[in-house]
Amino acid sequence: MAKPKKELPMPKISSSERHFTLALIASILIPIVRGLFRLEAKGVEKLPKQGAYILVANHVTNVDALAVAYFVYRVLRRAPHFLAKESLFRIPVIGRILLAAGQIPVYRSGHRNDAPMRAANSYLDAGHSIAIFPEGTLTRHPDLWPMRGKTGAVRLAIETNVPVYPMAQWGSEKVLPQYGSKFRPGFWKPVQILVGDEINLDKYRKKQLTPAEVNEATDLVMREITALVEKLRGEKAPADLWDPIKAGQTTSGNFKKAGK
């Protein structure tokens, strides 16, 4: 029988979003990010300058989190908080830095996520924002369109009664291909970000939702994100959201390597 994984600590909630430790970490990472790509953001005025909300975005490559974090910290002047996979927090030094920067570890399987959800709730209660990739992993779509989402973002939004804003990003695949090893950084390479209007979830903001309603709300979130990706790419997405299970793909980890 496999030995249970050690419980991970959760980040400490600071009343100040842009605290000293975060500023110190940012001072090291910002020059690095600027050397990797050039961020171009539109629709920033749609996001509240203060107060809690959830920002949901599509997930194409492992560079996405850097792009969104840079956007939140440098453009929005707020603190980036992500729900990130637990394996990152088990890496020596890296895990400590992530916690110090206010990131929340999320367990993929075999462990309840009560503590991470409490941490996310606490950040929102304190008036911070949370960034989530609802797909839960890099998209499995062959042409990198957003795929079906997981319900965590919607459940968190309903539970805390905070607004949800969709965001699309495109261009990171030119810097680092999806699960590829050919890293092609360049400060001239644009990574575009487009923010949309608040997603209307009023229909679902009630105490008890059926599983069908939660899935319906999640599909709504993913379609709002997809519509923004269409604008950035200048082309139409497939009518149906990609379902990795129906396609016989793994739902976590490197599905390309697993399929070989």
Image (tube, grey):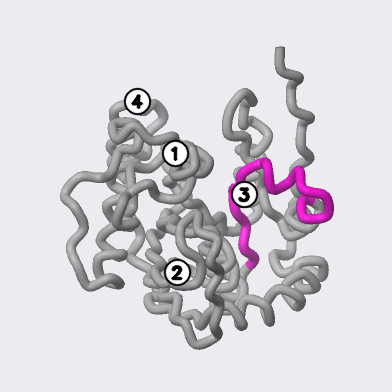
**What amino acid does circle 1 point to?**
Lys
Q: Residue at x 28, y 46 (%)?
A: 220
Q: In the image, is residue 123 part of the stretch drawn in magenta?
A: no
Residue 80, by quadrant, is bottom right
Front disc: 2 or 3: 2
Q: Which residues are magenta?
A: 79-95
**Observer-nearest of 138 and 39:** 138
Dot 3 surroundings within 10 Å: few (below 14), some, or many (20 or more)?
Answer: some
The span from disc 4 to disc 2 (Cα, nearest Å) is 29 Å
Which residue in the structure is indicated by mark 4?
A: 211
The span from disc 3 to disc 1 (Cα, nearest Å) is 45 Å
**What amino acid does circle 3 point to?**
Asp
Height in image: 83 above or below 197? above
On screen, residue 25 versus residue 180, left or right, reads right
Which residue in the structure is indicated by mark 1?
A: 260
The span from disc 2 to disc 3 (Cα, nearest Å) is 18 Å
On screen, residue 249 versus residue 153, left or right, reads left
**What amino acid does circle 4 point to?**
Pro
On screen, residue 149 versus residue 113, left or right, reads left
The span from disc 1 to disc 2 (Cα, nearest Å) is 42 Å
Q: Are marks 1 and 2 in contact (CB under 8 Å)?
A: no
Front disc: 4 or 2: 4
On screen, residue 204 versus residue 164, left or right, reads left
N-terminal of the pair, mark 3 or mark 1, is 3
N-terminal of the pair, mark 1 or mark 2, is 2
**What amino acid does circle 2 point to?**
Leu
N-terminal of the pair, mark 4 or mark 2, is 2
Which residue in the structure is indicated by mark 2?
A: 47
Q: Residue at x 58, y 34 (%)?
A: 108
- Is residue 181 in view from this perspective? yes
x and y percentages locating residue 83 in the rendered image: 59, 48
